[in-house]
Image (cartoon, rainbow, N blue to C red):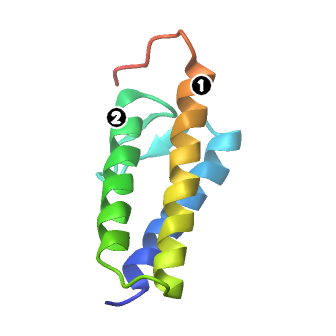
Amino acid sequence: MSRDPLRQLIRKTLNETITSLGKRQITLESGDEVAYGCMRHLDEMNSTLDSLVHLRNNTPRRTSRRYSYSRAIGSLREEIRNIKRKLGNQELHLD
């Protein structure tokens, strides 16, 4: 399996995270722009997380690729937790 999909997912996730710090709009994979932390944004992050978990689970143990997937999964889970924590008791935007 090529590393290109992994690198693209990691780059996309990191770019969104870095961009989100100074920007409140996120461009989804579909090309739509939505508010950072809205339900559509969280849904896409969870979908990306599921894809990464699937890729990691199908990668041999003790390989650098599996380690990279695990790191990306951890970062994305932390970002999702941070969004949910930041929103706290506020209702999520339903864009």
Q: Nearer the viewer, residue 70 or 8?
A: 70
* Direction from residue 18 to residue 10 in the image, left or right: left
Is residue 7 at least partly visible in the picture? no
- Residue that mark 1 sits on: 85
| Residue 89, image x, y percentages | 53, 9
Residue found at the very far front of the displayed protein: 61
Q: Can residue 88 be seen in this snapshot? A: yes
Q: Hey, which quadrant is residue 32 in on the image?
A: top left
Amino acid tagged 1: Arg
Q: Secondary structure at mark 1?
A: helix
Q: Where is residue 94 shown, x and y percent of the image?
A: 34, 20
Label number found at residue 40: 2
- Describe the element under mark 2 as helix, strand or loop: helix
- Give above or below for 47 relative to 4: above
Q: How many marks?
A: 2
Alpha-carbon distance for marks 1 and 2?
17 Å
Outermost residue, right direction?
22
Crowd around label 1: few <14 · some 14–19 · many ≥20 (10 Å)? few
Vertical comparison of 10 with 89: above or below? below
Residue 37 picture location, percent across and down: 49, 31
Q: Amino acid at mark 2?
A: Arg
Q: Residues within 10 Å of mark 2 (few under 14, many from 20)?
A: some
Residue at 57% across / 44% down in the picture?
Answer: 79
Point 41% across, 84% down: residue: 4
Q: Residue at x 36, y 90 (%)?
A: 2
Q: Nearer the viewer, residue 23 or 1?
A: 1
**Occupied quadrant, residue 53:** bottom left
Q: Quadrant of the C terminus?
A: top left
Q: Residue at x 57, y 16 (%)?
A: 88
Q: Nearer the viewer, mark 1 or mark 2?
A: 1
